[in-house]
Image: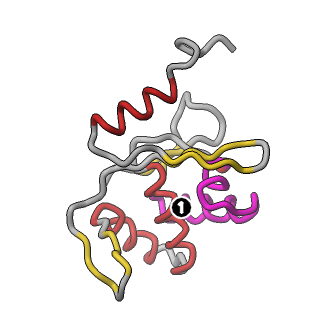
Amino acid sequence: MYIIESWGTGIPRLYNRSAEYGLPEPLFEEFGDGIKVTMFRKVSSSAQKVGSVDEKVSSTFDKYVSMLKNAGITDKFIESIETVFHACDTRVVFGQVNVQEWLECSKSKATNVMKAMKTAKIIKKVPGAGFGRYQFIEL
């Protein structure tokens, strides 16, 4: 496809950018004949303790919750949508395949999650990005 900049620069750049932003190094995991790379990002400085588990507070996602509840979206779907939101935030364009990957779920569940987000009008179609490409609306 001729879309790479140069051979062998991607992984060192991942490590360099992580260090540059003061983030943990990327985590590489082998899965059969593939790999999974986990990149970390900065999280809100406010956190609360829930039992022995740190629960990160996302005031940004909280703004979407009222829209989701008003649209009649169930708490289970809201949890899934929050996972999607944290995987991409408002700057990333995504589609059903991304949702399926981030939630590690079936195609039908990813379709239902996308449908719930559309119903609540928290995502918008991104013209020119390809078929079925969406982005969270800015609040």
Q: Tell me the residue at 44%/51% (across/down).
A: 136
Q: Which residue is mark 1?
A: 117
Is residue 105 part of the magenta span, yes or no?
yes
Is residue 99 part of the magenta span, yes or no?
yes
* Vertical comparison of 27 with 46: above or below: above
For the rendered model, the colour scheme is secondary structure
SS assignment at label 1: helix
Residue 63 left/right relative to 113: left
Q: Nearer the viewer, residue 69 or 32?
A: 32
Name the kind of residue labelled 1 in the image.
Met
Q: Tell me the residue at 64%/42% (across/down).
A: 132
- Which stretch is magenta? 97-122
* Vertical comparison of 64 with 40: above or below: below
Image coordinates for residue 33, horizontal then vertical, percent: 78, 42
* Vertical comparison of 112 with 125: above or below: below
Q: Tell me the residue at 25%/71% (across/down).
A: 47
